Image (spheres, rainbow, N blue to C red):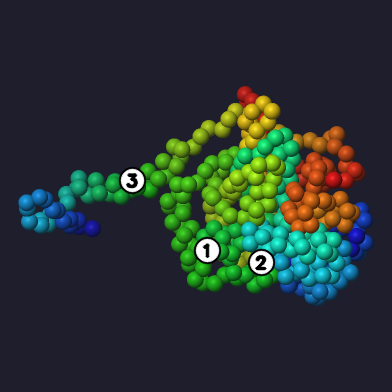
Amino acid sequence: MRAAVIGLGATGARVARQLQSWPSIERLKLHDTSPLRVQEATASLGEGSSGSGTVDEALEGCDVVVLCFPGDPVPTARRALRAGSHVVSLSTTREAAAGLLDLGEMAASARRHVVVGAGFSPGLSELVVAHVAGRFERLEAIDLAVTGSGGMACRRERVGRTFGGGPAQNGGGTEGGTSLAATSLAAMSLKATLRSLVPDPAAVLRWFPEPLGQLRCEGASGAEELLLADFGQGSPSVALHRHLPAGEVVLALLPASLSSRKPEMDLGGFAAEVRGTTARGSEVVLAGAVDRPAVAAGTVAAVAAGWAVDGRLGGPWSGGVGMKVQRPEVFLSELAVRGVKIAEFLPGSTTDG
Amino acid sequence: MSSVTVSLRRTGATRTTGRLGVAGRMTLLLGVASVPAALVFGARARKVQPAPGRWEQVRFDGCPRDTGA
């Protein structure tokens, strides 16, 4: 397998590490807007990996390319498909997912997969829903609550969307290249202050797997809404909630060099409440995961890339990983071997554990 | 703040201006402070206790790993 990773932030670096350990890897090309990051990554990964000065150079002669940068992935995905490569994207925004799903025809004619949102959430969350969806005759509703960020770029994008009404402005690179306009910074700070004084009355509590436990979440928008809507029979209604920890805005606004604690060091998680009907009547299943989002996302993306090249993906040519994997438990077992595990809430008499 | 001036309007009376005493100021202060407090405690009061149970790791021990999707 000849693979390329574009964007070497917290998540991209982990994707590269996972790909390097893929059994059939022959060559791994790395590209980032920051040459220093490329240098650090190649030095860390050692033999078998090489840096590429441009995106086109990275795409040349590749079987699969993994896109791990903030912003619009569609133009790069088009270039990768034209170059004859499968595409795995970790974009989390609804707009990016919609743009990638629209590449279905192009992907079909190239007979190449476009895997949309192959990260922690969407990605692992979608696989978990796909796994439990098999128990239902008909799915009625999926309520997904998410917390955590892959890296600084991911955190800034989420904070920007929550408090700035759109993605945080960035320099098109990963952590190092991100900057915020003074106006959006002021607007975000004001909104965040108001939010801390007057809690959103529409906020809901969601229970995440331990040790995260109960967290207050607010309504959010993301790629998950699109990717989960086609699950199972019955086109379930999809609700997405996100928990934004206190201080997240300040941390997102600080330059990377001033934040001592990187977001990828913190635990993230998701909890998916899936409602539907079974032979026994109406039922609810609660499943989720707790992990470092960048680590889990890197593993999901690398396994998706490996499966695309090995011809183990199906479903639509452009779609979420949950739609492309016909037996989610097989994919999940592959993730479990690599240390990414999921949990299910078992109703009973005890509340610990 | 040495005094708080308020305007009063009563039916059949002309506009009157008066001063709030200590009790009035305290009432005003508590009234203002109660708004965020009500929102905070109201949100907390809406908390629902989780159903009894526990999170358990899902195992895929018996799952074939090399058969593909």
Query: What residue is drawn where x is 64% and y is 25%?
Result: A348
Report helix, strand or loop for mark 1.
loop
Type of amino acid at the residue the image marks with label 3: Ser
**Residue A67 spot, x, y in % from top left:** 75, 63
Query: What residue is drawn where x is 50% and y is 46%?
Result: A203
Mark 3 closeness class: few <14, some 14–19, many ≥20 residues within 10 Å = few
Query: For this view, does A140 lie left or right of residue A15?
Result: left
- What residue does disc 3 label? B34
Tell me the mark number nearer the camera, choosing from 2 and 3. 2
**Residue A271 spot, x, y in % from top left:** 64, 42
Mark 2–mark 1 distance (CA, rounded to whole Å):
15 Å
Mark 2 closeness class: few <14, some 14–19, many ≥20 residues within 10 Å = many
Numbered mark located on residue B37 in the image: none
**Residue A10 spot, x, y in % from top left:** 72, 60
Query: For this view, does A305 lie left or right of residue B24?
Result: right
Mark 2–mark 3 distance (CA, rounded to whole Å):
43 Å
Type of amino acid at the residue the image marks with label 2: Gly
Q: Is residue A352 visible?
A: no
Q: Quadrant of the rendered structure where residue B39 is?
A: top left
Label 1 marks a residue whose chain is A
- What residue does disc 2 label? A71
Report helix, strand or loop for mark 3.
helix
Q: Considering only vertical position in the picture, is A298 above or below A201? A: below
Foreground pick, A313 / A121: A313
- What residue does disc 1 label? A164
Type of amino acid at the residue the image marks with label 1: Gly
